[in-house]
Image: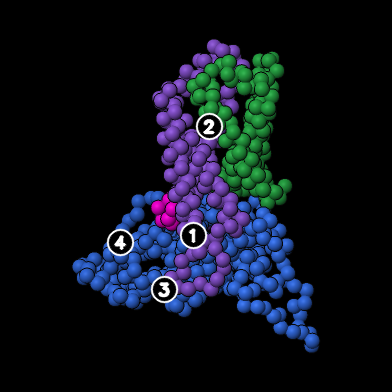
């Protein structure tokens, strides 16, 4: 990477024991040739999140910092970013948990940068859509004699974990295959494929298995498990992918 | 779209073993040992073909490999072979969904069931067995 | 060929190779490592048909497994229609070349035409 110029803001203030240096990556692909970092001294409390620190910067120092956020409670999946080298949700990461006086925030890897910390999600949504993330069956149209699709608690347990996915993209950002493979379906979409294949109401197993059985499909997962380690909702995509592959290898039916 | 446009982490990110625990180390070692073993295998096929040159040709080539460096290389190959085998069996079982845990309602702090102790033991076993095999190989080669 | 079939072959060749390579190494060790590498000993091994047959099978199994592994790594490194085709055909060609070269050694020594 090219040399990174550092612009120091508010550096005159010596950080108190309850303050951190927040380093924010600034990059506009339309104007800048390389990423640069801006540093800000931000006071924090035990409960202060990284997102709150970034919003503090926007409020008092530089309003032009681009960041995507919405719910502030790990539900919308908007504020995924690289925090101190690892993909995390900014709203779900407390500064006090990081055990560092310097907090560096960068845009998520493996996603094209729009500006600063905001990235494009088109590819994630495309691959998510590709695995048909909906129930497939012939009788989905509601008729007068339609009944509920009954499901036992045991059947629900088989996929409920994977329906917690908020499409934040952290798994795709951590995945070693995604780091180099532009065509890989990715852990997010593969975990969602399992979520529907494991649903007792769904009849689209064969269709989905066919979709992911290609040269940049499920077989490019090597069970490194980084996706599961960064998932903020406990989805465990690595488990879903291996269980899904179990169907293809004949371990499951 | 270029790599920079896609903001891909690239090979540096792929091979970085420091951020995601022992599983990522195993991923890297699996790749490196695989490539190393393929290189050795090609060399071994060439090496054994010198038998066609008769006893003199064979002995000449054998002398090249029966050196300290040759023995060290072979010891590394033994380690790679054992690691690739043991970790490969672990990964293969994992790929079939064996030992990756059962889906359940996740609870905070969301420790992933697939990254469980069985797989960690598998990885450490692969590393330890590789080290033992390498030492045994060194003992056999330098002991004679 | 579907990727699932290729990968099943990948796993199958790995499992079969583990068993046969173990036998190959054990035979080397039981003969004594240095002694087993003596010219006469190696020739005798090649001339023993079951052993030569096992070497041929190991050659085929490891060539398939090794070059498919290389193909997977290369496919993940870079994408593009032409590149991916070149990688796939290149790996198949290299696999065939290695099997041919190794088979030539085995046959020539086994039949005494070398």
Q: Do labels 1 and 2 share a chain?
A: yes
Picture mark count: 4
Is A53 covered by the magenta stretch? no
> Is the residue C72 above or below the residue A58 in the image?
above
- Subunit of mark 2? B
Report the Cα–Cα distance between label 4 and label 3: 25 Å
In this rendered view, identify the residue nearer to me: A245 or C112: C112
Q: Give residue C59's position: percent from left, percent from top.
A: 63, 32
Looking at the rendering, in which quadrant would you find the C terminus of chain B? top left
Residue at numbered disc 2 = B40
Res. A1 in view: yes
Q: Residue B115 carries which label?
A: 1
Q: Seen in the image, is B136 located left or right of residue C61?
A: left
> Around disc 2, counting alpha carbons within 10 Å, would you say few (fewer than 14), some (14 to 19), or many (20 or more)?
some
**Residues at discs 2 and 4 in contact (Cβ within 8 Å):** no
Q: Colour of chain C?
A: green
Q: Residue at x 55, y 58 (%)?
A: B99
Mark sitting earlier along the chain (4/3): 4
Callout 3: SS: helix
Q: Is B42 in front, or is A93?
A: B42
Element carrying mark 4? strand
């Amino acid at each position: 990477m090219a040399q990174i110029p550092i612009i120091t803001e508010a550096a005159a203030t010596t950080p108190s024991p309850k303050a951190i240096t927040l380093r924010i990556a600034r990059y506009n692909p339309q104007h800048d040739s390389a990423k640069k970092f801006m540093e800000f001294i931000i006071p924090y409390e035990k409960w202060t999140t990284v997102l709150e620190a970034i919003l503090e910067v926007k409020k008092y120092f530089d309003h032009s910092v681009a960041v995507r956020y919405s719910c502030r409670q790990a539900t919308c999946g908007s504020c995924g970013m690289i925090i101190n080298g690892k993909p995390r949700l900014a709203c779900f990461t407390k500064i006090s948990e990081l055990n560092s006086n310097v907090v560096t925030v960068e845009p998520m890897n493996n996603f094209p940068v729009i500006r600063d910390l905001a990235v494009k999600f088109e590819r994630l949504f495309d691959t998510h859509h590709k695995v048909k993330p909906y129930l497939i069956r012939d009788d989905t149209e509601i008729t007068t004699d339609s009944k509920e699709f009954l499901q036992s608690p045991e059947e629900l347990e088989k996929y409920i974990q994977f329906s917690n996915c908020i499409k934040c993209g952290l798994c795709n950002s951590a995945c070693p295959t995604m780091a180099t493979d532009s065509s890989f379906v990715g852990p997010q979409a593969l975990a969602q494929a399992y979520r529907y294949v494991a649903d007792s109401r769904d009849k689209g197993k064969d269709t989905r298995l066919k979709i992911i059985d290609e040269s940049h499909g499920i077989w490019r997962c090597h069970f490194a498990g980084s996706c599961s380690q960064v998932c903020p909702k406990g989805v465990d995509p690595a488990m879903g992918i291996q269980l899904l592959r179990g169907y293809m290898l004949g371990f499951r039916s | 779209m270029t790599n920079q446009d896609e903001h891909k982490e690239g090979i540096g990110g792929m091979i970085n073993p420091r951020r995601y625990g022992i599983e990522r180390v195993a991923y890297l070692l699996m790749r490196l040992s695989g490539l190393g073993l393929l290189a050795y295998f090609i060399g071994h096929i060439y090496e054994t073909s010198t038998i066609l040159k008769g006893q003199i040709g064979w002995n000449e080539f054998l002398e090249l490999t029966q050196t300290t460096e040759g023995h060290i290389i072979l010891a590394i190959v033994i380690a790679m072979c054992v690691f690739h085998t043991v970790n490969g069996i672990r990964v293969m079982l994992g790929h079939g969904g064996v030992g990756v845990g059962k889906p359940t309602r996740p609870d905070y702090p969301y420790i992933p069931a697939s990254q469980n102790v069985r797989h960690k033991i598998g990885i450490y076993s692969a590393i330890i067995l590789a080290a033992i095999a390498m030492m045994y190989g060194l003992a056999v080669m330098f002991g004679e | 060929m579907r990727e699932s079939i290729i990968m099943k072959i990948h796993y199958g060749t790995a499992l079969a190779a583990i068993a046969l390579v173990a036998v190959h190494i054990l035979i080397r060790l039981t003969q004594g490592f240095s002694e087993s590498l003596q010219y006469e000993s190696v020739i005798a091994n090649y001339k023993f048909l079951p052993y030569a047959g096992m070497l041929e099978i190991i050659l085929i199994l490891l060539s398939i497994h090794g070059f498919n592994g290389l193909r997977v790594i290369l496919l993940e490194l870079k994408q593009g229609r032409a590149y991916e085709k070149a990688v796939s055909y290149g790996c198949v060609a290299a696999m065939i070349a290695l099997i041919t070269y190794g088979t030539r050694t085995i046959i020539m020594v086994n039949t005494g035409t070398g």
